[in-house]
Amino acid sequence: MRHDEFFSDFDAMFIELARRARTGRFEPNCDVFLSDDGETIFVDVEIAGSDPAELRVGVEERCLFILGRRTRRDRAARGSFLLKEIEYGDFVKKIHLPVAVECRDVTASYRDGMLTIRLPVSRSATVPRRRTEIQMTVQRILA
């Protein structure tokens, strides 16, 4: 795939998610922290029920984007809702990063409904001005 095609596809992904904005679109909760040595940013995202294979992660300048979907479980066998607090559907999470990161060294794991993204801090002060989809495999860790 050519460089221009890649970024065109990445832009189309954001446009499609904006177009589909409707009830059911939500922002999952997250925690962001910097390691004690200042060399790594960790992002924990609460997305229980999401399929790790459908998650997409990207960086644009100093913003981390996490896109995915949490599908509704079959509720027909359970009866009628008395209380509904769990959000389902497409989600987008945009997180402002305090420093530039090394996109090629990003890793992610999914365990017990939590997505953990590890972003090494860049030694360069310059921030790329383009969108970069992080090519990575999200590993499901079984306890």
Image (cartoon, grey):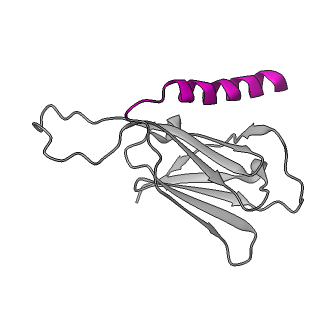
Q: Is residue 69 left or right of residue 98?
A: left
- Secondary structure of the magenta portion, mostly? helix
> Going 47% across and 46% down the picture, which residue do you hit?
27
Q: Is residue 4 left or right of residue 93?
A: right
Write down the region rendered in magenta: 1-23
Q: What is the total number of numbered labels drawn onto the structure image?
A: 0
Q: Does the magenta stretch include residue 98?
A: no
> Going 66% across and 43% down the picture, which residue do you hit?
136
Is residue 110 placed above or below 89 in the rendered structure?
Answer: below
Work out whether residue 80 or residue 119 is closer to the camera in this orientation and state it. Answer: 80
Is residue 71 placed above or below 122 in the rendered structure?
Answer: above
Work out whether residue 23 or residue 31 is closer to the camera in this orientation and state it. Answer: 23
The picture places residue 24, in percent across and down from the top left corner, at 38, 35
Query: Is residue 35 among what the camera can see?
Result: yes
Work out whether residue 124 or residue 109 is closer to the camera in this orientation and state it. Answer: 124
The picture places residue 71, in percent across and down from the top left corner, at 36, 35
- Furthest toward the bottom, the residue is 36
Position of the N terminus by quadrant: top right
Query: Is residue 1 among what the camera can see?
Result: no
The picture places residue 10, in percent across and down from the top left corner, at 69, 29
Q: Is residue 16 magenta?
A: yes
- Furthest toward the left, the residue is 79
Position of the C terminus by quadrant: bottom left
The picture places residue 95, in percent across and down from the top left corner, at 62, 52
Is residue 77 placed above or below 126 in the rendered structure?
Answer: above
Q: Quadrant of residue 58?
A: top right
> Going 78% across and 47% down the picture, which residue do you hit?
61
Q: In this view, does 139 lie to the left or right of 121?
A: left
